[in-house]
Image (tube, rainbow, N blue to C red):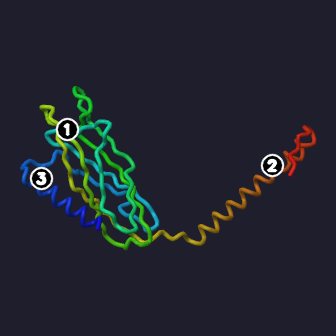
Amino acid sequence: MKHLILIVAMLVASARAQQAGPANCLQLQRVKVDHHLLHQQGETVAELTFKARNCYVVAAAEKPDLAFAAEPGLFVLVKDLSFKHEDEQNPGRAKEMFVSVTLSASLTVPVGEHQLRGIIKYQTVNSAGDVTPESLAIAIPFKVAPPKVEHPWRAEFRDGLELFGEVLVGIVVLPIMLIYCPLSGQCPTC
C-alpha cells in the first residue's frame, strides 16, 4: 500500500512538472554507492549530489524533506544533508546539495539489482528572491549481494589473539599486584 501511495505521488509530481513547463531547479548529478553494492546483513552509504540550475536552493534551518519507498528488509536512514557554493551576497542560498543515505539490508532482500525510489521536497529561490516549493523524484540504483561469510581461519586467528592478549595482561598485572599490595597495604579483596 505504501508503494502505491508513493508511486501515485511521484506520478502526480511529474505530471505537475510537465504541466508547469519549466524544469526543476535541482538535478541529481551523481549517485555514488560505497563498494558499488550492499551485502545482505550489511550496510553501505549512498552519496547523492544535487546541482541547482538558474536558481538557488534554500539552505536554511528547515532542511529539505526526503521520503523513500518502503522495501521489505531494506532500512534507509538519511545520515547527512549539507550545502555548498552558498551565495555570499544572500546567505541561506546554495547551488549544490549533498545527501548521504545509509542503506542496510536483511536476509529477506533478494540478491540482484535494485532501485530505491524516493521524493525530495525542497524550496528554491530565484534571482528576484521569490521562494517556491518544489519536489523531485529520485532513484538510487544499487546491487544486493549475498552476506559476507567469515572464513573459519579468521575466526580462529581472532580467538587466538584474544587469548594471547588476556595471557599477556595477566603476566604484566600479576607481578605488579604481588609487589605493590604487600608494600602499600592496599590490596583489593574479592
Residue receiving disc 1: 56
Q: Residue at x 34, y 72 (%)?
A: 112
The one of 175 and 59 positioned closer to us in this rendering: 59
The residue to which callout 3 is attached is: 17
Against 154, residue 127 (above or below) is above
- Whichever of callouts 3 and 2 sits on the residue coming sooner in the sequence is 3
Q: Decide: marks 2, 1 in contact (CB < 8 A)?
A: no
Mark 2 or mark 1, whichever is nearer to me:
1
- Residue 147's disc number: none
Q: Residues within 10 Å of mark 3 (few under 14, many from 20)?
A: some
Residue 178 rendering spot, x and y as whole percentages: 89, 47
Q: Which residue is mark 2?
A: 173
In the image, taking residue 134 as reference, residue 71 lies left or right, namely: right
The answer to whether the residues at label 1 and label 3 have Cβ atoms under 8 Å apart is no
Q: Position of residue 143 (x, y in %)?
A: 34, 67
Q: Nearer the viewer, mark 3 or mark 2?
A: 3
